[in-house]
Image (cartoon, rainbow, N blue to C red):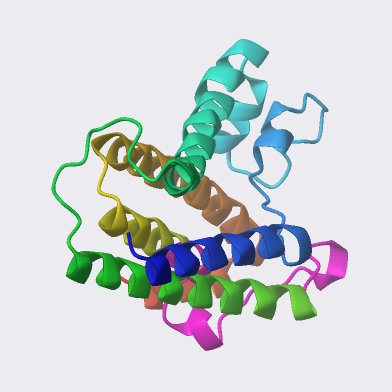
C-alpha cells in the first residue's frame, strides 16, 4: 500500500472516530437494550422480536455480544496491517495491485461520505428521543432506507480491496449478517410506530439499494 492509500485509510478511520463521538445515532435495537432485563425493554416490538429480550443472559451474550468481538477485530485489523506494514495473518487471497488499491481507496471514501451525510441529516434534526423521533424519507433516504449502513458496507468493501485477507472477508460476512438482523429488528419497531406511513415507505424504497 503506497503512502497516498495509507493516508486515505487513516483519514477515513479518523472520520469514523469523529462520527462515533459527534454524530452517533442511537439504535432502537441496540445490543445494550437487548441485554437489559427491565420489564419495558421490549416495548414497541412484535412478539417475534420481543421474545429476544426474554432470552437468558448467556444466550444473549452468544447471539449479540460475541459477534461484536468479531466486528471490532474486523475494524482493528486494517490498522494492524498499516502499523506492521504487512498482513500478520498472511492470508491474502490475491496480490492487491495498485489499481485495485486505488479502487478500494475510492470506494471507502465514497462510503464515508455517504455515511457521514446520512448521520448528519439525522443528528441535525432528530435526537432519536421523544417527539424528536421521526421518519426520514428525503435526501439519501429517498433512495435507500439505510444509507448510513450502505456507506459502511462500501467502507469495509473498499478496505478489503486494499488488503484482501480471507479472515477479513469472513469478518465482513459476520458484520453484514449481524447488521442486517439489527436492521430487520429496527424495521419491526418502525412499522409498529409509524404504521402505514412506514409500510408505504418500505414498499417504495429498498432496504439497501434494492
Tell me if residue 77 comes above or below residue 70 in the rendering.
below
Residue 149 magenta-drawn? yes
- The magenta stretch is 126-151
* Image location of residue 62, percent across then percent down: 53, 18
Whether residue 146 is visible to the viewer of this picture, yes or no, is no
Question: For residue 165, what is the image quadrant?
Answer: top left
Name the residue rendered at 82%, 28% in the picture: 39
Question: For residue 3, what is the image quadrant?
Answer: bottom left
* Image location of residue 124, percent across then percent down: 77, 80
As drawn, which residue projects farthest toward the right? 130
Residue 6 magenta-drawn? no
Quarter the C terminus occupies: bottom left
Does residue 158 appear to the left or right of 8 in the view shown? left
Name the residue rendered at 15%, 51% in the picture: 95
Whether residue 43 is visible to the viewer of this picture, yes or no, is yes
- The total number of labels drawn is 0
Q: Nearer the viewer, residue 156 or 195?
A: 156
Name the residue rendered at 36%, 57% in the picture: 159
* Image location of residue 144, percent across then percent down: 43, 74
Does residue 198 appear to the left or right of 35 in the view shown? left
Name the residue rendered at 54%, 33% in the picture: 68
Question: For residue 171, what is the image quadrant?
Answer: top left
As drawn, which residue projects farthest toward the bottom? 139
* Image location of residue 116, percent across then percent down: 59, 74
Quarter the N terminus occupies: bottom left
As drawn, which residue projects farthest toward the left? 94
Tell me if residue 130 comes above or below residue 120 in the rendering.
above
Amino acid at each position: 500500500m503506497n503512502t497516498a492509500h495509507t493516508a486515505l485509510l487513516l483519514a477515513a478511520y479518523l472520520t469514523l472516530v469523529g462520527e462515533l463521538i459527534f454524530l452517533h445515532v442511537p439504535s432502537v435495537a441496540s445490543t445494550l437494550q437487548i441485554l437489559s432485563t427491565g420489564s419495558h425493554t421490549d416495548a414497541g416490538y412484535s412478539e417475534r422480536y420481543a421474545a429476544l429480550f426474554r432470552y437468558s443472559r448467556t444466550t444473549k451474550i452468544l447471539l449479540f455480544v460475541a459477534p461484536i468481538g468479531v466486528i471490532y477485530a474486523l475494524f482493528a485489523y486494517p490498522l494492524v496491517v498499516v502499523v506492521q506494514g504487512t498482513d500478520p495473518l498472511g492470508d491474502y487471497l490475491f496480490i492487491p495491485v495498485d489499481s485495485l488499491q486505488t479502487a478500494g481507496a475510492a470506494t471507502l471514501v465514497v462510503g464515508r461520505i455517504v455515511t457521514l451525510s446520512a448521520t448528519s441529516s439525522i443528528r441535525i434534526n432528530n435526537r432519536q428521543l421523544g417527539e424528536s423521533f421521526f421518519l426520514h424519507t428525503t435526501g439519501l433516504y429517498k433512495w435507500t432506507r439505510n444509507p448510513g449502513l450502505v456507506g459502511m458496507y462500501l467502507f469495509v468493501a473498499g478496505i478489503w480491496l486494499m488488503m484482501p485477507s480471507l479472515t477479513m472477508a469472513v469478518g465482513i460476512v459476520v458484520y453484514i449478517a449481524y447488521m442486517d438482523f439489527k436492521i430487520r429488528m429496527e424495521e419491526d419497531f418502525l412499522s409498529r410506530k409509524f404504521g402505514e406511513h412506514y409500510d408505504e415507505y418500505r414498499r417504495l424504497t429498498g432496504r439497501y439499494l434494492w
